């Protein structure tokens, strides 16, 4: 019995010990699970709401502006050429590069001596031709008088022959007398014929004299015109350029001595795309006579000049795209703008109704826009891109009245929760001083620090030395702002 009692006691002690051991193991296991779960829960970052500036989509009627660039040129440029050959004896004060001349001013003059001699000779030839014509006219008149007299003689001879024939028929006269009358009639007819031939010759000489007089008159007019063209006058007011004339030099006929540019007929030539050109047409396919603004840069100052669309180029130049369009300036100031100046052209299109204007930072190149949805979560919307206007985009097919994100940052996307920041009403913004620059380092709360550390530790592509560097920076009370923003952007991209 003593042995059995000791054995039973030993078994009881062993059972109690085993129970205590199992209980301790369970406690340790539960503690370990709680610790592991707490660490895991602590490493999981909570969802962050980004603050974004928002605006409301408003329906508007907008007139888009086509912006192009071109150079000014004159619609009327005249080559100044010498009409006659000779020596330049005088030049106008304004006949030089950049000189301003008025309509009717004498630009240059050629020595008129030879031209005056030519006029005098032509006048002499005309006088000689007139004398020849007068002589021919007098001879013709005398020939016609002689022909008339011969006609009267013939008429008398005919009457005498008829009378002798009547007497011969009655037997009063002889055959010889009748024959004499007939011969006299024939001689008179021959004389008349000779006189008529003389008249015809004198008429021919008269016509020839008239032709000669006309030719000499034309030569005289040409000589006088050459003499008048020895002085070249400006046909219109303008600016002289490309002058090659020097007083005293000899010039040949049709030699170019300069150019005259009409500064009141300035126009700008600019090129637009085919789509832009189609927007400049009216419903009939004709170019609209729309008002155009020309921006001229003078140092830091920009001046706006009025112009009107005028016409399009007649043909497409080789190697060029689009269409060449011309706009005529309205009363340009020649002292301010000249041919060759570079200008910016702004052409208004026809108004677009039911569209919205948004910043270029709010939309992607293919027209995707972020809207504020339920629970302030982002919703992506596909809009129709209509026009690009500087820092703004004109879009259609958008839900008017909805709010959209002004700046589409990399960490933003569909489903992300944000905190919308509404713009302050116009006129209600306080005139506060400029905000101080953002600090280079910031103090992190434990949630943000834990989220970044967990992301770094979970990264399999990061090198060990870089991981140690980042963890060392995050262990400091203040962390560089660039480091925080970098990893928070990566965390947003990975979600």
Image (cartoon, helix red, strand yellow):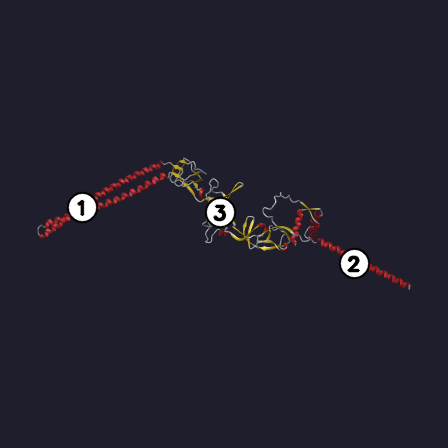
**Residue of label 1:** 150
Q: Which residue is denoted by mark 3 in the rendering?
A: 292
**191 or 270: nearer the eye?**
270
**Labels 2 and 3 touching (C-beta < 8 A):** no
Foreground pick, 233 / 425: 425
**Label 2–label 1 contact, CB within 8 A:** no
Label number found at residue 26 = 2
Across and down, in percent, residue 303 comes to 51, 42
Do the residues bearing badges 1 and 3 touch, measured as CB atoms within 8 Å? no
* Residue 107 found in image quarter: top left
Among the two numbered marks 2 and 3 on one chain, the one whose residue lies closer to the N terminus: 2
Residue at (22, 45) in percent of width and height? 199
Q: Classify mark 3: residues with Cα within 10 Å, few (<14), some (14-19) or many (20+).
A: many
Q: Is residue 292 left or right of residue 141?
A: right
| Left or right of 361, for residue 205 | left
Q: Residue furthest front?
A: 428
> Which is in the foreground here, disc 1 or disc 3?
3
Crowding at mark 2 (Cα within 10 Å: few <14, some 14-19, many 20+): few
Q: CA distance from mark 2 to mark 3?
A: 88 Å
Q: Nearer the viewer, residue 133 or 280?
A: 280
Name the secondary structure under disc 3. Answer: strand
Name the quadrant containing residue 112.
Answer: top left
- Tell me how far mark 1 sits from mark 3, CA to CA: 87 Å
Residue 210: image location, x then y, percent:
28, 43
Residue at 63 percent of width and 56 percent of height: 374
x then y, percent, for residue 62? 53, 51
Q: Is residue 60 left or right of residue 453?
A: left
Position of 382 relative to 89 (above/below): below
Q: Of marks 2 and 1, which one's residue comes earlier in the chain? A: 2
């Amino acid at each position: 019995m003593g042995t059995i009692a000791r054995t039973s006691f030993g078994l009881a002690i062993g059972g109690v010990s085993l129970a205590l051991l199992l209980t301790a193991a369970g406690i340790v296991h539960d503690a370990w699970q709680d610790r592991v779960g707490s660490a895991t829960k602590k490493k999981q970052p909570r969802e962050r709401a980004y603050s974004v500036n928002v605006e409301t989509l408003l329906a508007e009627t907008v007139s888009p502006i086509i912006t192009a660039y071109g150079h000014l040129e004159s619609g009327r440029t005249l080559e100044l050429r010498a009409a006659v050959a000779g020596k330049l004896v005088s030049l106008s004060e304004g006949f030089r590069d950049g000189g301003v001349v008025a309509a009717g001013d004498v630009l240059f003059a050629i020595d008129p001596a030879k031209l005056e001699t030519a006029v005098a000779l032509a006048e002499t030839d005309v006088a000689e031709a007139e004398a020849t014509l007068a002589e021919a006219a007098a001879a013709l008149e005398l020939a016609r008088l002689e022909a008339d007299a011969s006609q009267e003689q013939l008429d008398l001879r005919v009457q005498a022959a008829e009378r002798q024939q009547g007497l011969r028929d009655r037997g009063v006269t002889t055959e010889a007398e009748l024959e004499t009358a007939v011969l006299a009639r024939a001689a008179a007819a021959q004389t008349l014929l000779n006189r008529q031939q003389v008249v015809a010759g004198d008429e021919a000489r008269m016509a020839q004299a008239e032709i000669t007089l006309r030719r000499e008159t034309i030569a005289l007019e040409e000589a006088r015109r050459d003499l008048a063209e020895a002085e070249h006058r400006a046909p219109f007011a303008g600016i002289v350029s490309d002058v090659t004339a020097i007083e005293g030099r000899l010039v040949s006929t049709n030699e170019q001595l300069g150019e005259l540019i009409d500064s009141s007929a300035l126009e700008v030539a600019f090129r637009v795309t085919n789509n832009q050109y189609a927007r400049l047409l009216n419903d009939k396919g004709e170019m609209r006579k729309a008002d155009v603004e020309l921006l001229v840069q003078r140092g830091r100052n920009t001046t706006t000049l009025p112009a009107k669309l005028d016409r399009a180029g007649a043909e497409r130049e080789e190697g060029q795209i689009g269409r060449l369009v011309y706009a005529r300036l309205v009363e340009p100031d020649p002292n301010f703008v000249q041919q060759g100046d570079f200008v910016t052209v702004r052409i208004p299109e026809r108004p677009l109704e039911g569209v919205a204007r948004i910043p270029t930072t709010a939309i992607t190149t293919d027209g995707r826009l972020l809207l504020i949805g339920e629970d302030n979560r982002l919703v992506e919307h596909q809009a129709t891109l209509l026009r690009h206007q500087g820092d703004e985009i004109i879009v259609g097919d958008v839900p008017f009245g909805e709010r959209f994100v002004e700046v589409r940052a990399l960490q933003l996307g569909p489903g992300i929760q944000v905190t919308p920041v509404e713009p302050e009403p116009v006129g209600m913004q306080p005139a506060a001083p400029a905000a101080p620059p953002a600090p280079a380092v910031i103090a992190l709360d434990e949630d943000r620090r834990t989220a970044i550390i967990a992301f770094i530790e979970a990264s399999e592509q990061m090198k060990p030395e870089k991981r140690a560097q980042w963890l060392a920076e995050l262990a400091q009370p203040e962390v560089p702002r660039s480091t925080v923003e970098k990893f928070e952007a990566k965390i947003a991209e990975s979600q």
